Amino acid sequence: FYAGAFIHATVPSIMTPGNHEYSNVVLSPQWRPQFALPTNGPKGLEETCYQVNYPDMKIVSLDAEQIDESEYYSKAQVRWLDSILLNDPRKWHVITLHYPLFSTKPDRDNPELRAALKPVIDKHKVDIVLQGHDHAYGRGTVTNDDSGTNLQDLTSGTVYVVSVSGPKMYDVGEKAWMDRRAGNTQLYQIISIKENILAYTAYTAIGELYDAFDLVKQDESPNRLINKIPENFERLQ
């Protein structure tokens, strides 16, 4: 909180809480005084689970720790997410949460989180899910062929991203869902939208392009994924 104070006071930020913002399922007392976040989510999760609406995009923050620890708040968030995505007119839908539905770690999996959220994500064809926690980088869909079509689920085409910007690192596994992965690498992402194209780029801390893709909206079909992965080697150590 101290390190980011001046940044958070000058740059609009959409924060999502993780496990380190909680102690024994109690939210840190620094969270709400530190940020000015919406209170339009489920009751009891003000400023941790919320939505931000732009003319052509909806961004949703989910409180992953409460999904993991509280059956009540897990169900409340799933119901709320379903309700705000239902018939939403915006073209692009983005979800951010701390715990990943698909992990980058060799020995980690989150089946309960996936069981809770993925049916709603698939139902509403969420475009991209931004996640953390695993201290590594991974990006992909469930499974892709070269055309970008989701082979296991032709109804959604959601892209899942796990990334890390801090100094702590974990091993990255070799998992089928990842089109691009990195270990021991700090990254940041730039996402831009112009009409029917969402352009995603990921850079290392020294500004090297490491990953890129476009999502193209298609009428009555899943998004078309166009991989633009640079030719530099994957950073796995």
Image (spheres, rainbow, N blue to C red):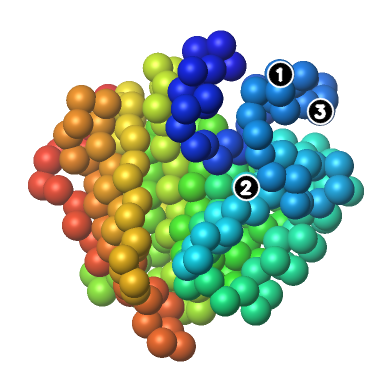
Viewer-nearest of discs 2 and 3: 2
Residue at the (17%, 34%) spot, across then down:
208
For mark 3, give the secondary structure: loop
Percent across and percent down for residue 132 are 51, 37
Residue holding disc 3:
25
Residue holding disc 2:
61
Precedes in sequence: disc 2 or disc 3: 3
Please, is residue 2 above or below residue 201 in the view?
above
For mark 2, give the secondary structure: strand
Crowding near pointer 2: few (<14 within 10 Å), some, many (20+)?
many
Please, is residue 51 above or below residue 123 in the view?
above
Percent across and percent down for residue 222 are 43, 78
Precedes in sequence: disc 1 or disc 2: 1
For mark 1, give the secondary structure: loop
Viewer-nearest of discs 3 and 1: 1
Crowding near pointer 1: few (<14 within 10 Å), some, many (20+)?
few
Residue at the (68%, 75%) spot, across then down:
86
Horizontal side, residue 207 vs residue 194: left or right:
left
Please, is residue 214 above or below residue 129 in the view?
below
Location of residue 138 (image quadrant): top left
- Residue 30: numbered disc: 1
Q: Amino acid at mark 3?
A: Val
